[in-house]
Image (cartoon, helix red, strand yellow):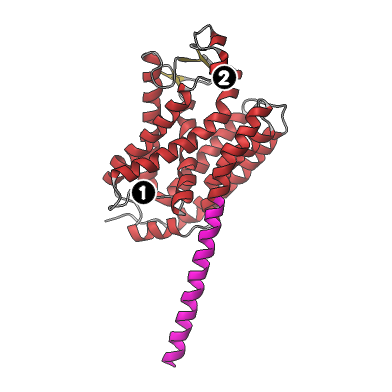
């Protein structure tokens, strides 16, 4: 028997996600007040990371249920760790040769700090939701039965590029503060001149991010998700996803909050410009599509109410 979503779970998931949104906005405000290009000191940065993790988890659980959300989390983190470890172990063929500083990012599994794949996860979901709002006017779109693998692959490329847009803004700051070092660039004694990098980050990094996120979403949508039954009845799940409440903007708030922060408090002014236009454009497009869909659904509801009123009048 298919397990149904309980009213108690629904009652608590949404308010908790809204609370996380408020806390996220608060932490972004604090970040904006700091000196240019700096982060909040520990443990506040860690607390902010936990808040963003819960925003992602709660929104995905509400839309897909526990089983699908847990499966996506595990597959996402496992693939990211595998990419990172392979990259480090085999000379940087994916992202470029890099080394994570010991101690700065906490404990490691192999050569990869645990926080890295988890951090990638809570930005992977917002990029996915933004892409879906822009392309489909819905926050969550699984693989439909009639959808070809080619079309799905194109969707996954969009998710990868939206995620990499965030990398364009945050990676130079991470390199600047020594969280990781690219050993093939001139500043670290490597052969790549600084002029051929993006604020000290080799271009291979961004190619690797797009490939990584593409793989994460294609594996989940094409392989993992179809193997698992949804904990929600299919019609109820689709109805929830299609409702487009304000709740569906929570991933946009997460993504957009960083766009605002990285614009107003950038490592340098050039990166501030990149953050504003590269991150700001998909946020505005997703919000616009959400408003368009809300207006469309409102018109449909109004038409249904008029039709029902006419039918009642005829019956009388």
Q: Residue at x 40, y 25 (%)?
A: 81
Q: Nearer the viewer, residue 244 or 30?
A: 244
Percent of width and height locating residue 286: 53, 49
Q: Residue at x 57, y 28 (%)?
A: 170
Q: CA distance from mark 1 to mark 2?
A: 35 Å
Q: Quadrant of the N terminus?
A: bottom left
Residue 27 inside the magenta-drawn segment: no
| Residue 307 seen in render | yes
Percent of width and height locating residue 269: 68, 28
Looking at the image, tell me whether mark 1 or mark 2 is earlier in sequence order: 1
Is 140 situated above or below 29? Answer: below
Instruction: Count residues near mark 1 (Cα–Cα under 10 Å), then give few for <14, some for 14-19, many for 20+.
Output: some
Residue at mark 2? 175
Percent of width and height locating residue 95: 43, 21
Residue 311 inside the magenta-drawn segment: yes
Q: Quadrant of the C terminus?
A: bottom left
The quarter of the displayed image where residue 26 is located: top right
Percent of width and height locating residue 100: 49, 16
The residues colored magenta run 287-316
> In the shown orientation, is residue 203 left or right of residue 34?
left
Element under disc 2: helix
Say the numbered circle drawn on residue 142: 1
Is 110 situated above or below 137? Answer: above
């Amino acid at each position: 028997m298919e397990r149904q979503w309980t009213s108690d779970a629904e009652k608590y998931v949404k308010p908790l996600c809204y609370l996380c949104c408020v806390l996220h906005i608060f932490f972004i405000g604090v970040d904006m007040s700091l000196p240019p290009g700096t982060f909040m000191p520990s443990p506040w940065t860690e607390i902010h990371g936990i808040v963003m993790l819960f925003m992602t988890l709660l929104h995905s659980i509400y839309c897909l249920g526990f089983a699908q959300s847990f499966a996506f989390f595990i597959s996402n983190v496992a693939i990211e760790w595998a990419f990172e470890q392979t990259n480090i172990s085999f000379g940087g063929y994916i992202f470029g040769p890099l080394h994570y500083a010991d101690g700065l990012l906490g404990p490691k599994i192999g050569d990869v700090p645990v926080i890295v794949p988890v951090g990638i996860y809570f930005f992977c979901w917002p990029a996915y939701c933004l892409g879906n709002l822009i392309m489909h006017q819905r926050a969550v779109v699984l693989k439909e039965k009639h959808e070809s693998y080619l079309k799905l692959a194109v969707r996954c490329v969009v998710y990868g590029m939206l995620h990499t847009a965030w990398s364009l803004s945050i990676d130079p700051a991470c390199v600047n503060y020594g969280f990781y070092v690219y050993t093939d660039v001139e500043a670290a004694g490597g052969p790549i001149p600084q002029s051929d990098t993006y604020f000290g980050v080799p271009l291979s990094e961004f190619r690797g991010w797009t490939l990584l996120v593409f793989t994460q979403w294609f594996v989940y949508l094409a392989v993992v998700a179809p193997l698992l039954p949804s904990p929600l009845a299919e019609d109820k799940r689709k109805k929830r996803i299609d409702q487009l409440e304000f709740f569906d903007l929570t991933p946009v708030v997460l993504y957009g909050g960083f766009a605002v922060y990285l614009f107003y408090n950038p490592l340098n002014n050039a990166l501030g410009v990149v953050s504003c236009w590269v991150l700001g454009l998909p946020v505005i497009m997703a919000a616009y599509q959400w408003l368009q869909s809300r207006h469309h659904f409102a018109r449909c509801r109004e038409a249904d109410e008029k039709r029902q009123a006419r039918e009642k009048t005829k019956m009388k």
